[in-house]
Amino acid sequence: MSTFSVSYRSTNGVQILDLHGELDAHTASDLEEAIQSCFEDGSVQLLVNGEELQYISSAGLGVFMAYVEEIREADGDIKIASLQPKVYNVFDLLGFPVLFDICDTEEKALHLFEEGNTKPSNEESS
Amino acid sequence: MLPSRIRAAWDDLTLPDFSSEAWRGVLVSVFLLGFLLGAAYHIGTWAVGSAPGIVWRGAYHVVVVLTYASFWFLLSSYLQNRNAQPTQTFFITVLVGIAYLLLAVLIQTLGDPALGLDYEQRVVESFTSVVKVNLLSFLEISFTMVVLLLLRRLVFYRRTRKSVRNWHLMLFFMVLAGLLTFMKDPSDDLGVLVGIALVPAVGMAVVNSFRVSWIVYLPFREKMATMGLAFFLMVLLGLALGDGVLPEVSSYARFYSYPLTVFALIAGIFGILYCVTTLLSLLFHLPTSSAFKRKADEMAAMQSLTSLISQVLDLEKLSSTIVASPVEAGSADVSWLVLTDGDGQAKLQATHGVSPAEVADAIDYEALLEQVQRREDVLLLDEAPLDRRVRASNGTAFESVLVVPLLTRNAVLGALFVARDVSYGFEKDDIESTRVYAAQAALALENARLFEEQLEKERLHRELTIAREVQQKLLPQSIPQLPGVAVAASSVSAYEVGGDYYDFVQLDDERLAFIVGDVAGKGTSGAFYMAEMQGIFRSLSHLSPDPRSFLAYANRAISSALDRRAFISVIYGVLDTAKEEFQIARAGHCPAAVINLHGEARLLRSGGIGLGLNNGSLFSDSLDVMRVQLQPGDVFVLYTDGVVESRDVDGDEYGYDRLLDSLKEHRHEEVDDLHDALLRDLHEFLGNDEYDDDLTLVVVKWHGVTMQPDVASTRAPATAQTT
């Protein structure tokens, strides 16, 4: 049985979500609820720390797509940091580095928040 | 009372089966012969004018006693009806009594009114008296015997060993008392000894006359009728035994046989005693009989309804039956049923005798349900309007409310509410019977729920089977044949329907388009997106076969249809046999594996994001198309993540390296064997045949259009370049 949990931290107005365990089709809704509640609480600068994330499936990746549009429209962003190589490979295969800022350390991601850098919006026409 | 050994011997004492034809024949013969012998004796004494010696007289009395003993067993065998109706039994007895009295009075008035008996000489003085002695004695004895035997049916109602024993004891003492008067003269008194013997006989008669339990089960009307009949019978017996109407009968009978007269007398006394107890018992039971009847009806109604509800499986119908029963059985004025749904919410399921709105207005049934759920026992509100959860004013149907939880082995399904329009309307037995009923109802509800769930499950299963069949038809049913190209493909879903997809389209004589895709989405939604992808591939690949433009159009087409959490990773390629080139592009999908004849294997990991992740320029900007110059013996493997991400029991992934190793090992085999070998290796790694994920594997092998071994061997290994 896969286990998954989210714990919360906050630094300089950035809400940090630490992911633990395995994120798959069964646990994806847990993360979705976590992101949704952060967004509803007014946090739009979200940093997902994947240091303790052991595994992610494609359904788990879908969660990041669920709210990123709304958050970016609210001048916020979801950034991802400290992924383990195996997990990063899954993000990479799907092309997530194009869509999200994925940093190897949390500091770099926080720095990007300070600079106000965001990836281009989904709505932008080609 | 008796030593146990005697008691046992007594109980085991069995008589011959007198109801058999043979025995009846014997008994009738003995009776007729004895009766005629007796008559002959009296005619003899009348003709001679004096009685014979003591031996003859003794013989006469023995014969007479034996005659009537036979008659007793004969009657007994005919009157053994076990299922006698009490009223009917009394009615027959009364009829027999009236017939007896009429006949006896008639015979008494015949001929010479004088008694015509000479007690001194022990002779009969006239022929009329001979007739009277024989007939009147027969009538009296047979009447009392019939009374005794008919009442036996009632005494034996719900018989026990003890009641049978008491009955036989009474008969024993009656016979004993009778026999003690053997050879007594008709004018003699009974004497002290007989008087003592009468005491236990009458005592047992009293004991037996209290066997009147059949009274309880009589309906009111029959009680009244039986009372009348019992009274009438008592009067008849009184007249028959007394000297008022039939002053001479007892004299004749005593003259005929003293022992039989004593037996008849005690039988008559028993009859009167039985009538008295019956009358008194009936009198005392009359006031309670309507209440008893109501209760019996209620219980019968509940019983039949209980068996009914166990046959209903439709939840709606069952609910209305459950609430209707207590009202129809008369134990409540209104009733309603509250069930908890899956989320624990109380729902007013059905009402009877009251509208759902009235109940909802007057009763806070949720709070009441919560309380009975907690205590798992009934809750009785004797004065409901005083309870804060009841908002009814006085004078409504909710004066007293009984709440009974519907308990199953591990849950409280809800509660049955019954109410009366009077306060303190429920007695202890009402509560008990409603509790028993509710237990049955809970069982029936549980069954109905399970049945419904099972139906739903089966329906879903059927639907999913259909979906699976449809989805299987979306996959290519045959593989296009192009010279120089061999293809093997398979796809397995972990569940009924999956999100994996592969397909081929032959674009023209030289070109073949491939696609392998994997929908990331919730459950069965993947199957719909997969179907949509199939439509896009089948139509768009003809119009715009070039990988870059195909994927760009496909991304735009599918993005609008996808849920924002869902996306599709695909790998798309066009194999051109004329140019001997394979163009391939990856939209977020697992990279294709390629190996050449020499065993040099690699992954074609070009850039590209999944379909549906971005409908802007990012998709096209990040997309790379790879061109691979084909060499005979080149093998391309396209697959979904179910292959490389499948994990064994230890949680280790199969992985890319193992795939490439397996590919290297089997690369010389024919495409079908190679395909099977790759799957086999995966299965061996997993250790079982079950998948957590959908799994698709497409193997493409290039043999070359024309066999040019010199050219093939001089060419460089497969090269790829990105554009």
Image (tube, rainbow, N blue to C red):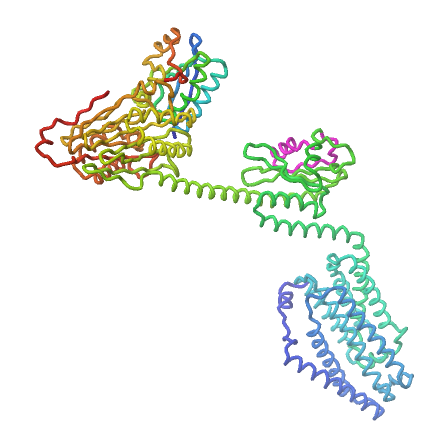
The quarter of the image holding the N terminus of chain B is: bottom right
Region rendered in magenta: B363-387
Position in image of residue B697 (x %, y %): 28, 35
Residue depicted at x 21% and y 40%: B673
Position in image of residue B392 (x %, y %): 74, 32
In which quarter of the view is residue B577 placed? top left
Position in image of residue B219 (x %, y %): 76, 57
The answer to whether B462 is drawn above or below residue B517 in the figure is: below
Q: Is residue B384 magenta?
A: yes
Position in image of residue B207 (x %, y %): 75, 62
Residue furthest left in the image = B710
Can the viewer see residue B207 in this picture?
yes
Is residue B301 found left or right of A59 in the rendered image?
Answer: right
Residue furthest top in the image = A115
Q: Is residue B16 magenta?
A: no
Viewer-side residue, B198 vs B533: B533
Viewer-side residue, B491 vs B41: B491
Viewer-side residue, B175 vs B591: B591
The quarter of the image holding the C terminus of chain B is: top left
Viewer-side residue, B434 vs B700: B700
Residue furthest bottom in the image = B48
Can the viewer see residue B652 in this picture?
no
Is residue A27 found left or right of B684 in the rendered image?
Answer: right
In which quarter of the view is residue B226 placed? bottom right
